[in-house]
Image (spheres, rainbow, N blue to C red):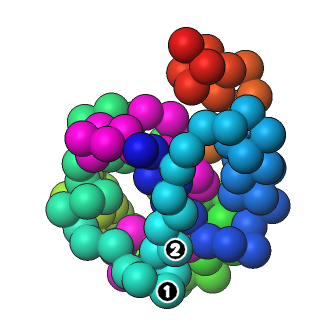
């Protein structure tokens, strides 16, 4: 079963969940705002996606950080630390397979079709 990581009130998460439900793709939802996320889990996503893509600089969370906090993010380790502390700065959603491998980042209907309707 897939795991979809995100926050429930995010419009992109709602689109992804609607698409998965409509196409009868089984998944469980993980709310990292409520349940937290470890730096190790975030860092594991960097093996599939560059940390610069996982870090959502367009997010309100990122924009509200101080310049000093932003300046500390210089590599994967510092990005994982920041994102585990501020999970709403993670690009949403991240979807993992049953083995914990990140498959997709963000929501794109074409990518979802190619990835989940094989």
Q: Position of residue 61 (x, y in %)?
A: 61, 76
Query: How many marks can you see?
Result: 2
Q: Quadrant of residue 22?
A: top right
Instruction: State yes or no: discs 1 and 2 in contact (Cβ < 8 Å).
Output: yes
Instruction: Answer with left or right where residue 11 lies relative to residue 69.
Output: right
* Residue 12 part of the magenta segment: no
Q: Residues within 10 Å of mark 1 (few under 14, many from 20)?
A: few
Q: Position of residue 112 (x, y in %)?
A: 64, 27
Numbered badge on residue 31: 2
Q: Is residue 41 left or right of residue 66?
A: left
Q: Is residue 89 magenta?
A: yes
Report how far apart the C-alphas of labels 1 and 2 lie in the structure.
Answer: 6 Å
Q: Residue at x 39, y 69 (%)?
A: 83
Q: Residue placed at 50% from the left, 35% from the top? A: 104
Viewport quadrant of the C terminus: top right
- Residue topped by disc 1: 34
Query: 35 or 72: nearer the eye?
Result: 35
| Camera-nearest residue between 109 and 2 | 2
Residue 2 in view: yes
**Quadrant into which the N terminus falls:** top left
Q: Position of residue 25 (x, y in %)?
A: 61, 38
**Residue 66 in the image, given as x and y percentages of width and height:** 52, 83
> Residue 39 falls in which quadrant of the image?
bottom left
Residue at 66 percent of width and 65 percent of height: 59
In this picture, is 30 found above or below 49?
below
Which labelled disc corresponds to residue 77?
A: none
Relative depth, front residue between 39 and 31: 31
- Mark 2 lies on a secondary structure that is strand
Badge 2 density bin: few <14, some 14–19, many ≥20, Cα 10 Å: some
In this view of the protein, which residue sits in the foreground, 70 or 59? 59
Q: Which residues are magenta?
A: 82-105
């Amino acid at each position: 079963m897939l795991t979809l990581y995100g926050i429930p009130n995010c419009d992109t998460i709602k689109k992804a969940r609607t698409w998965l439900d409509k196409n009868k793709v089984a998944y469980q939802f993980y709310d990292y705002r409520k349940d937290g996320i470890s730096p190790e889990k975030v860092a594991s996503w960097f093996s599939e996606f560059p940390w610069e893509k996982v870090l959502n600089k367009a997010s309100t969370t990122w924009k509200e950080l101080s310049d000093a906090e932003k300046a500390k993010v210089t590599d994967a380790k510092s990005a994982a630390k920041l994102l585990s502390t501020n999970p709403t700065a993670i690009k949403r959603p991240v979807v993992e397979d049953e083995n914990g491998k990140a498959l997709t980042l963000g929501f794109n209907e074409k990518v979802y079709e190619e990835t989940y309707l094989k």
